[in-house]
Structure formats: C-alpha cells, structure tokens
C-alpha cells in the first residue's frame, strides 16, 4: 500500500535558476528598433507594431482609441471588408489595441504567410483613410455597447475607482461617454493618425518560428517610415478628496462590486518588487489571505483579488471583488482585518516559503513559449527597464524577509490611504 | 502531429503520456466522463458544485491547494454539460506531488460539512455574478428550455435554479462521487518534460490501488425531432433589443458536424464574414451579430444572436437574418470563401497546440470522445468538406420547423 499521508519530496521552486531567453536586436534603416525571439515548435509567429499613440497624447477624449480602432477600416486601396478578407483568407488575426502611452497593431499568423500579410499592414500604417461612414458605424455601435456596460456594476466600479485615483481628466482616470463618442470628428482622427502613426515613433516586437532573413524582411517594409521622435506627455494627477463612496447603479442588483485602492509608485520605485511579494501574500493568488478568508472561509464571493495596476507612469494597489449585496460591508471589514494582521504580525516561514514557491513556479510556467517571452521583454522595454528588473524580481522573491514584509505593510496598508467604493 | 503513448491500469484508468522536452514544466490533466447532462433534473448544478468540492480536501490530505502551491504549481478546473476537467501545471521536478494530490482525491474526498456549506455559498455568488446581475444573463437558461424538451441540455452547468444548489446534501455529494469519480470513468494525461517510464511507475504507485468502480452507462433521453417552430418573447430591464435564434444540429461524432462548424465560420467570426458585413456594416440593423454552435457531444444547437440598432424593428432584423440564411440555402458559397474558413481552422489549431496545457486537454477530450488519436485527424476531416456539403447542410439545418426564436426586448422602449 502506498502511504498517502506524507507528501512526496519536492524541489523548492526558490532553488530554480530562472533565466529570460535573450532577444535578438536589430535596427531598421530609419532607426526603428526591432526585438526578436526565435523559438517554439509550431510554425506560427507574432508581430507587434508599437506606436506612441496612446490616449496620453490626445487633446480630446477617445481620439486615440478611435484612430487605433479605425486603422483596419479602410485605406486608399482597400475597403474595411477587403482588408479583413485578406487577413482572414490567410487564417491570420490582426488586432489593434490602444493603451495609455502606446497603441499597437498585432498580427498572429502562420509563418508561411508572412510575406502576403506585411504589405497590407504597411498599407494600414501609411494609407489609412478613416472613412466617415466607418466612423459613424463605430460611434453608433460603441454608444450601444456602452449602454449595456453601464448596467454592469463591475464596469461602473472599474471606471470610477480609476477616476478617484488619478483624476477624471488624467489619461489613467478618464472614461467614455455617449456625448464624447458623438463629438468625434474625422479630421481629428486623420490628424492624430498623421502625427502618431504615419510620422510617429515605432518600436517592433517579433516572436515565434521566424523566417530566415527576418531583419531584411522587416526593413523592406518598415525601414522607410519617417519614425519621428514623440515626446510622451506626463499630465498631473488630480485624485479625489472624498475617499469612501457607495453607489446604487441598479436598485434590484443582488451583488455589489467592491474596489478598495490606494495610489502606488511605478516600477522604478525601490519598493515595487518587494510589494509584489506582499501583494501575493495579501490577495495575489488562490492561496492568499483574502481568498482564504473571504471566499474559502466565509463564502462571501466567487473570487477576491489584489494587484498593482499595470501602468507606466503611476500605479495603484487595488483590491477587487464582487460580493453578495448583504455581505459587502462584512467583506470590506475583513479586507481591513487582513491589512491589520499584515501590519502587526510577522508572516511565518512556512507561509512565506509557500508564497515564494508559488511565485517562482508561476514565473517558470509563464516563460513557456516565444509569445510569453516576448511579452516579458516588451514590458521591460516599454517601462524603460533592463533585464536587471527580471533578475531583481527573482532575487526579491527568494530573499525578502518577514520583517521587511511587515514594515512594507505598515508603510502601505494603512486604511486611511485607501479609496473605498461599492457599486450595487 | 501530436505524439503520445497510451496504457491502461488494471483498474481501468486510461493513461496518456505526451512528452515535450522544450518546457521545464509538467502538466497533469484528469478528465472525468461526467457533466451537467448526467444530473437529476431535480438536482441540477451538481456536477459543477461538485467540481468546487474537489478542492475541499481529500481523505488523506486536508488541503489540496497548499501543497501544490508549495511545489510551485497552479491548477484549475471546469465543468461543461458533457464533462469535468481538472488540470495542474508545475515544475517537472515536482511531478510526483501532482500524482499524490490527484490520486488521493480520486480515492476519496474528505466530505466535510464546512466545505459543502462554504462552496454552496460561493457557487450561489458565481450564479449571481454571471447569470443574474448581468444584463441578458438569463438568456441561455430560457433558450435551452425552449429548444430542448427532453434532453438534459435543457439546463445550464450552473444549474436550473439557485435552490437546487442551496439544497444540496452531503449524502447526494457522496453518491455522485462514487458513481462518477472512479478510475474506470476517467482519463489521465501527463504531458511536458516527463518520460513514459516515470509516468508508468508513478501511475501504478499512486493510482494502481484505487478501486475500479462501475463503468457508468449513459442512458440519456434523446431529444425528439422538432416539428414546429418555437417562439418566446421576454421583456426585461435591458437597454437594447436582442434577437436569438437557434437550430438543432448533429452531435460531435457525426461527419456533418465538420460541415456545420465551417458553415458557422462563413456566417460569422471575422470582419469579412457574411452576417457582420451585411447586417452590421451594410444594412446597419445590428450593432453586433454572431453565429456559433455549442460544440457539444450530443446533438447541439447552431445559434445566431445579435443586438439591434436602436429604433430597428425586431421583425425587420429577423427577416434580414433569414435572407442571409436563404442565400446559404440557395447558392453555393465560392471556393475561395470555403478555403478562407479552412485556413482559419488550420491556423486556430496551430495556435491552440502551442501550449502543452492545451495539448494535454485535447488528448483527454478526444480520448473521452472515443480515441485520443482523433486529435490528429481533425484537419483532414475539415479538408474533405465541399461547397456542395455547405449547401446541403444549410438546407438541412436552417428550416423553420427546426428553429427556436427568442425576442429579448427592452422594457424601457
């Protein structure tokens, strides 16, 4: 009979030597930097064009996101339908996303089709027309979608907490409205497009099973873009004064969306990596204090999480959950109890080892495959960091002490610093 | 081509090993041949509630999650109408921890009253979060009940109603476990940086002495052929009118499944698909529209669903949908259009197969369906589909008497 009470011996994940596979780097004729990771078994690849065309740069709300969206909706040579048909015929996925500082075009395709696809991506970057008809459909459909979203308490809570943290005018805090969709003009989009895409600054990332001569190939299509420098703006923060808010969005709602958050510095701050460990312990994974207490012990919620927001200039430390309407206040009380416990008690060695092993295992698992590796590099590069950030992060997970975690909790987990919002 | 080896333990547990030495990780995937379709109509939501209870400690191990996290592992699980799946990813050095944990909970659960009480609440919150508080959240409860009269697909995996979950008793939980969670009803896949030899040794050691259990003989009521169209109208506090239509289609093992899978891709799923181009872009009747199918093991449903542009009459929008379907029934699609969706399928499979976790999951799925090797024969099956097949299936599926229609109307209008 197998003896089942005793766990098999394990290798502690803290003993693993983790490394981040280096990228290849090349520069196109116009100075565009390309970061490449050639790896993987499947014949697939990912190409990403990153422009400094995020909503930080826009003069009027929604201009950056709309310009980014409409990139795929018409060029001087093709209609939206023809563009889509081209990518879809080759089984490729062409996506675009707008963030705060940057906006991207992302292409996933079978490596064998890359030559047919790049010329059309080039066309989107240099010959987009942003047709009025497409803009009108977009405005109408986005307003309808917004209407549905505004019925959801989690959507409303997510918008408001960001506005409290950063200010309603700040790129990280502003949100959309039907009036602002209506106010969009084609001319504004074309001018934004001209400045931030056609003339704008570009960085590229490629990963997967790459074809031979990838550098020449990219240079052929993208080496002649103007690639002018772009000054990323740093708007001032205007956080809200009022810290505790309760909102009824739907009187018949059965759940409340709870957000508890405080401002936090960005990745360059010496506490950032250390607080990642404290966050894991607090609410960062399934075995965390918040999850064990509020889901697994009390059953107030399907899930509760805490995390540091993924922004470049400023961050925030956020606790987020949806809980039964009648247990929202009880859940909030428990969140503060867990903060107090972290401020007052040292975490014991076994729990700390658990967090370390979990975090290391999670990074190891996450480095699986070329797309994940390039995503790590992209994060490092766009945040103005180096690979030292990766190795410091590993080192912090391995070595941070219980005393350090307690003093970080005393510094950052103070209830009076937190905004607290419930939307039912 | 995904390589694997398969063997069966004396107790009937099927074990599949898929080696990939390019990753430092190992994946363990256990699929049980039980889903919401196997539930008692008066105790729905049980398979899914049960999935939660699987994390409440087993007979020899009080906590499932902690030792796994200590070994640097992560795990999750999901329940569908057809099956229940549990998966772990962890550093390959610690593979035995996964064997220890999974075999103990297959041996027997702890069946704690406290765990049941908490998870009942957690699942009720999940029910509220996904199906009660979201606008249109109850639509599939209604639609399934309209389209199915006998087959247990008429309820969702979360359950028909909250009370079924609230009333779950420990005795029901035990009975369910010993009926379905036995080696003979499960498939174990181990993938990643592992060797067949080691997996054989560990499987014998940890799973070999678990009593086999009785093979579950599934005997579900077949859904009678629908002979007249069905309609339902709902008024609710939602901002926009929405149209939902569905038609019965054959099950997963029928060759026609592959034709219908491609057919739905022609109608929807990309910016150049027919419904989107015609109804969103040209006619501007819908703000979004999609066509998909359930992908279920037993006979499933093809669905068209969309939200209407404000001011459009739902009857007018429905007519326009039918006009597009009539085109599918009356004219052959072009070879290029068919090739487009075949290329899309090829590329989708390539992207899915990038991750070891997905490969392990697929191997288990096809083994439960009949044979893990089928995973490698999917593309050739799609390749044989012709434009004539698409025409025939459009005619067979999109018939009025095969259709259920739901108008989900905004009461603020």
Image (spheres, coloured by chain):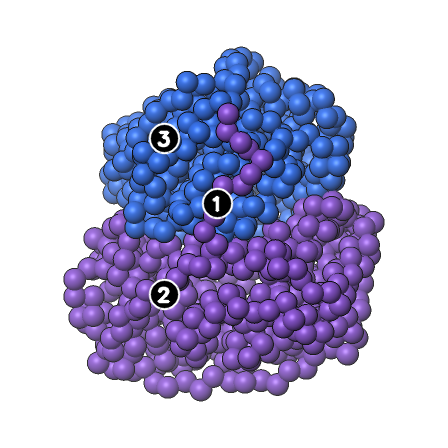
Chain colours: A purple, B blue
What residue is pinned by disc 2? A20
For the point 72% across and 22% down, the residue is B171
Q: Secondary structure at mark 2?
A: loop
Q: Is residue A200 above or below residue A335?
A: below
Circles 3, 2 touching at the beta carbon (< 8 Å): no
Label 3, label 2: how many angstroms apart (C-alpha)? Answer: 33 Å
Label 2 marks a residue whose chain is A
Quadrant for the C terminus of chain A in the image: bottom right
Label 1, label 2: how many angstroms apart (C-alpha)? Answer: 27 Å
Judge by depth and name the residue closer to the eye, B341 or B126.
B126
- Residue A36: x and y, percent? 28, 67
Circles 3 and 2 on the same subunit: no
Is B34 on the left-hand or right-hand side of A37?
A: right
Judge by depth and name the residue closer to the eye, A248 or A378.
A378
What residue is pinned by disc 1? A9
What residue is pinned by disc 3? B200
Q: Secondary structure at mark 3?
A: helix
User: Which is more N-terminal, label 2 or label 1?
Assistant: 1
Label 3 marks a residue whose chain is B
Answer whether residue A100 is visible to the viewer in this image: yes
In the drawing, what numbered circle is on residue B203? none
Q: Is residue A101 above or below residue A124?
A: below
Is A114 on the left-hand or right-hand side of A356?
A: left
Image-quadrant location for residue B371: top left
Please tell me whether mark 3 or mark 2 is closer to you in this view. 3
- Residue B407: x and y, percent? 63, 37
């Amino acid at each position: 009979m197998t003896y089942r009470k005793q766990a098999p011996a394990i290798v502690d994940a803290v003993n693993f030597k983790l490394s981040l596979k280096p990228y290849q780097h090349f520069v196109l004729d116009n100075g565009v930097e390309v970061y490449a990771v050639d790896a993987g078994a499947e014949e697939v690849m990912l190409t990403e064009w990153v422009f400094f065309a995020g909503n930080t740069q826009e003069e009027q709300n929604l201009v950056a996101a709309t310009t980014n969206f409409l990139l795929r909706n018409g060029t001087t040579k093709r209609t939206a339908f023809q563009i889509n048909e081209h990518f879809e015929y080759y089984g490729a996925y062409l996506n675009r996303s707008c963030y705060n500082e940057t906006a991207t075009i992302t292409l996933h395709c079978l490596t064998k089709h890359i030559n047919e696809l790049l010329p059309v991506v080039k066309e989107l970057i240099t010959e987009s027309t942003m047709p009025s008809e497409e803009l009108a459909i977009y405005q109408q459909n986005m307003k309808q979608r917004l209407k549905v979203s505004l019925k959801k308490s989690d959507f409303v809570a997510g918008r408001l907490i960001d506005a409290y943290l950063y200010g309603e005018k700040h790129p990280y805090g502003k949100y959309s409205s039907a009036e602002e969709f209506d106010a969009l003009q084609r001319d504004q989009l074309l001018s934004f497009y001209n400045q931030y895409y056609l003339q704008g600054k570009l960085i590229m990332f490629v990963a997967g099973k790459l074809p031979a001569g990838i550098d020449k190939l990219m240079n052929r299509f993208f080496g002649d873009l103007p690639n002018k420098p772009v000054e990323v703006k740093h708007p001032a923060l205007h956080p809200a004064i009022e810290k505790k808010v309760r909102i009824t969005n739907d009187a018949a709602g059965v759940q409340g969306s709870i957000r508890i958050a405080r401002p936090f510095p960005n990745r360059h701050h010496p506490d950032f990596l250390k607080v990642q460990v404290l966050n894991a312990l607090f609410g960062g994974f399934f075995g965390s204090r918040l999850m064990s207490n509020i889901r697994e012990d009390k059953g107030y919620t399907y899930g509760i999480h805490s995390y540091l927001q993924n922004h470049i200039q400023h961050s925030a430390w956020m606790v987020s959950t949806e809980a039964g309407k009648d247990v929202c206040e009880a859940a909030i009380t428990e969140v503060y109890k867990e903060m107090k416990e972290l401020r007052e008690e040292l975490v014991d060695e076994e729990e700390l080892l658990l967090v370390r092993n979990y975090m290391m295992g999670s990074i190891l698992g996450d480095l699986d495959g070329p797309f994940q590796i390039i995503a790590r590099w992209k994060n490092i590069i766009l945040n103005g960091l180096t690979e030292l950030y990766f190795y410091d992060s590993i080192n912090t997970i391995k070595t941070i002490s219980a005393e350090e975690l307690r003093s970080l909790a005393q510094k950052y987990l103070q209830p009076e610093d937190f905004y607290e919002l419930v939307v039912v | 081509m995904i390589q694997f080896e398969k063997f069966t333990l004396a107790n009937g547990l099927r074990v599949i090993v898929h080696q990939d030495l390019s990753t430092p990780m190992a994946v363990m995937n256990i699929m049980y041949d039980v889903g919401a379709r196997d539930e008692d109509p008066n105790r729905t939501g049980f398979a899914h509630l049960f999935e939660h209870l699987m994390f409440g400690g087993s007979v020899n191990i009080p906590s499932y999650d902690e030792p796994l996290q200590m070994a640097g592992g992560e795990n999750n699980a999901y329940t569908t109408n057809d099956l229940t799946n549990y998966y772990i990813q962890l550093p390959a050095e610690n593979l035995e921890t996964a064997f220890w944990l999974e075999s103990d909970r297959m041996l027997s659960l702890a069946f704690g009253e406290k765990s049941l009480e908490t998870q009942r609440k957690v699942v009720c919150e999940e029910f509220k979060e996904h199906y009660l508080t979201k606008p249109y959240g109850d639509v599939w409860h209604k639609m399934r009940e309209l389209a199915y009269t006998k087959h247990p697909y008429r309820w969702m995996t979360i359950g028909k109603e909250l009370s079924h979950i609230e009333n779950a008793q420990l005795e029901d939980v035990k009975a369910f476990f010993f009926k379905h969670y036995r080696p003979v009803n499960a498939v174990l896949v181990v993938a990643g940086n592992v060797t067949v030899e080691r997996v054989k040794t560990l499987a014998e050691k940890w799973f070999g002495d678990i009593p086999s259990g009785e093979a579950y003989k599934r005997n579900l009521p077949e859904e009678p052929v629908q002979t007249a169209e069905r309609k339902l109208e709902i008024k609710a506090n939602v901002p926009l009118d929405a149209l939902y239509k569905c038609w019965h289609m054959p099950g997963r093992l029928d060759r026609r499944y592959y034709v219908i899978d491609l057919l739905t891709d022609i109608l929807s799923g990309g910016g150049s698909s027919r419904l989107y181009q015609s109804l969103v872009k040209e006619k501007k009747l819908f703000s979004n529209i999609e066509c998909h199918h359930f992908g279920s093991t037993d006979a499933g449903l093809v669905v068209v669903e969309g939200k209407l542009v404000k001011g459009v009459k739902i009857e007018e929008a429905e007519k326009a949908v039918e006009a597009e379907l009539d085109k599918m029934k009356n004219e052959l699609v072009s070879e290029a259009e068919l090739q487009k969706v075949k290329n899309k399928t090829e590329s989708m499979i390539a992207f899915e197969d990038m991750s070891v976790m997905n490969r392990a999951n697929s191997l288990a799925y096809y083994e439960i369906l009949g044979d893990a090797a089928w995973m490698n024969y999917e593309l050739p099956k799609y390749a044989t589909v012709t434009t004539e097949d698409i025409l025939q299936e459009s005619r067979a599926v999109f018939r009025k008497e095969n259709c259920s229609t739901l108008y989900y109307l905004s009461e603020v209008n």
